[in-house]
Amino acid sequence: MLAHDVAIFGDNVEDGVDVVGELLFKSPDFFRVIGAPRPTLGASVNTAGKTDYAYVDLTWNTTLWRQIRGSEDDIYFGGFLGGAVHDGNLNGTGHGEKALGTRALYHLGAELGYQITAAISVEAYFAHLSNANASSRNAGLNNIGLRTGFKF
């Protein structure tokens, strides 16, 4: 779960908590030339009926420390970059809604995680959505929180 529209690099306008689901895939061999990122598909649903979005990213991860408690755990850092589409306000005419300017947005951010076992991880997560000034409206949207990961 993520805090929605956190006032980092902008103003808090929208309320609620986001429930996020994400699938990370194995990096294809041809991605080695760009650091072997993992293709990522995800969606974020806002519990207060504000902006929901779906995204496609490339996610790069690196291990910072290995075998802290046992043979399978580690601490990692990751970053992601991609695109999102949302159902939020474009022009700021709604009360308590961001003026996101365009339907398609950039989706980027970072995560710091702890791989508890080979199958379970927890992480601190920050995501930013923006159109990078491609429109006269570019309020941006920031989400931050904690996530749990399960490897199948």
Image (cartoon, helix red, strand yellow):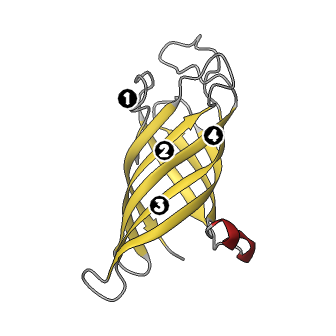
**5, above or below 89, in the image:** below
Q: Which residue is mark 3?
A: 78
Q: Quadrant of residue 84?
A: top right
Which residue is most to the bottom?
71
Chain-order first, disc 3 or disc 1: 1
Marks 1 and 4, the one that precedes in the sequence: 1
Tell me the kind of residue under disc 4.
Tyr
Mark sitting on residue 127: 2
Residue 19 rendering spot, x and y as whole percentages: 47, 47
Residue named by callout 4: 106
Query: Which amino acid is tagged 3?
Result: Gly
In the orientation shown, which residue stands out farthest toward the left?
69
Q: Residue at x 46, y 69 (%)?
A: 62
Identify which residue, 84 or 74, lies in the foreground. Answer: 74
Say which element carries label 2: strand
**Where does label 1 land, which residue?**
7
Q: Amino acid at mark 1?
A: Ala
Q: Which residue is painted at 62% across and 31% down in the image? A: 132
Report the side of 66 relative to 30 (left or right).
left
Q: CA distance from mark 3 to mark 4?
A: 17 Å
Residue type for callout 2: Ala
Q: Position of residue 96 (x, y in %)?
A: 47, 17
